[in-house]
Image (spheres, rainbow, N blue to C red):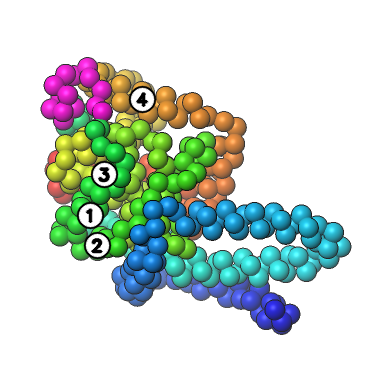
Amino acid sequence: MDQKLRNGIALSLIPQIILVKWLGHNPEWVEQYYSMGLYPKISGFFRFLFGWIPFSLGEIIYTLLIFSAIYYCYWQRRQIKSKPFIFLKNAAMVFAVFYFTFHLLWGLNYYRQPIAQNLAIRDSITKVEVLEFTKSLISKTNAIQFKITGDTAAIVQIPYEREAIFDKTIKGFGNLEKQYPFLKYQRPSIKKSMYSTFSTYLGIGGYLNPFTNEAQVNALIPLFRFPVVVGHEVGHQVGYSAENETNFIGYLVTLKNEDPYFQYSAYAFALSHCLIAIARSDESEFDQLYAQLNDGVKKNYRELNAFYAQYENPIEPLFQSAFNTFLKANNQADGVQSYGKVVNLMVGYHTKYPI
């Protein structure tokens, strides 16, 4: 490649960053022209192109790129050491291409209007509202757990294969679209991650590949939590990037499903986030509320905790720190803490639509 062209591509990173930051101050423009305009066409094309493939093409591409980078750095190590400026310039060129492609294909969704605005709900809540909502969730979760098992002490075992959960989630989005057209989901592309074990060690439940628009889901996650995680990743595919918003989408599409196992998954998910929020400010209140849960519900929570405990390792905190930095760099000021902000959306939504 011509040296002038390399330099031009590398230097394009500066105006790209300025443009993205400018767009961040114009969410209405991003919403109208990108998130609801260009993005659905781009994402639909890639899901049409790759959705039928039974494995994740994106993960294969990632693997090849990583090994290629390692191979290049190893065999070119002497040249890199002797001419570091040229290496840095080439790295800047590659990053400029990555930055442009990432934002064009998906990343600008970080700067769209908040989902609370599209739902016409508020996302600022009080502690009293969280407590009242949590009490309602305890009642709902206990009731559906007993409806499914007929025994308050029995753990809920979802009887579906993971592919069936994919199909039920897709149908759930079809139903949700009737009430909220902006959550329309076409040309599905949901796949079990080939790196599920590795993902679990890093604390990853799933992720969207922004370059192929494939939703990869950790296939090892306990089944009672799996439907919400699938819904979360599809939430990324329909154009929402903020983790609290996709958590809410995953909750809502699972809750609206007619299947009682899905409804249990949704209620248990919402309840766990509310209980965590309460525990942070008042442990005695948490203890009183947790004591009201059916033993079967507690067993499901212990199942989830035990699952993650067996994969604890010193690398996960480092990855979470890096991911925290990534989120903050992409318009999520709360970083990984934004996942827990789903409580605000759930309380706001159910203030308008009581459970």
Q: Amino acid at mark 3?
A: Ala
Task: Name the quadrant containing residue 71.
Answer: bottom right
Task: Point out which mark residue 303 bears.
Answer: 4
Q: Which residues are magenta?
A: 144-157
Residue 117 falls inside the magenta stretch:
no
User: 10 Å neighbourhood of mark 2: few (<14), some, or many (≥20)?
Assistant: some
Q: Earlier in the sequence, mark 2 or mark 1?
A: 1
Residue at x 64% of width, y 54% of height: 67
Would you say 307 lies left or right of 166 here? right
- The tag earlier along the polypeptide, 3 or 4, is 3
For mark 1, what is the residue? Answer: 173
- State which tag comes first along the sequence, 4 or 2: 2
Amino acid beneath label 4: Glu
> Which quadrant of the structure image shows residue 158?
top left
Give the numbered dot on residue 164: 3
Pointer 3 with pointer 4, Cβ within 8 A: no
Mark 1 or mark 3, whichever is nearer to me: 3
Q: Please report contact status of discs 2 and 1: CB closer than 8 Å, yes or no.
A: yes
| Disc number lying in front (3 or 4) | 3
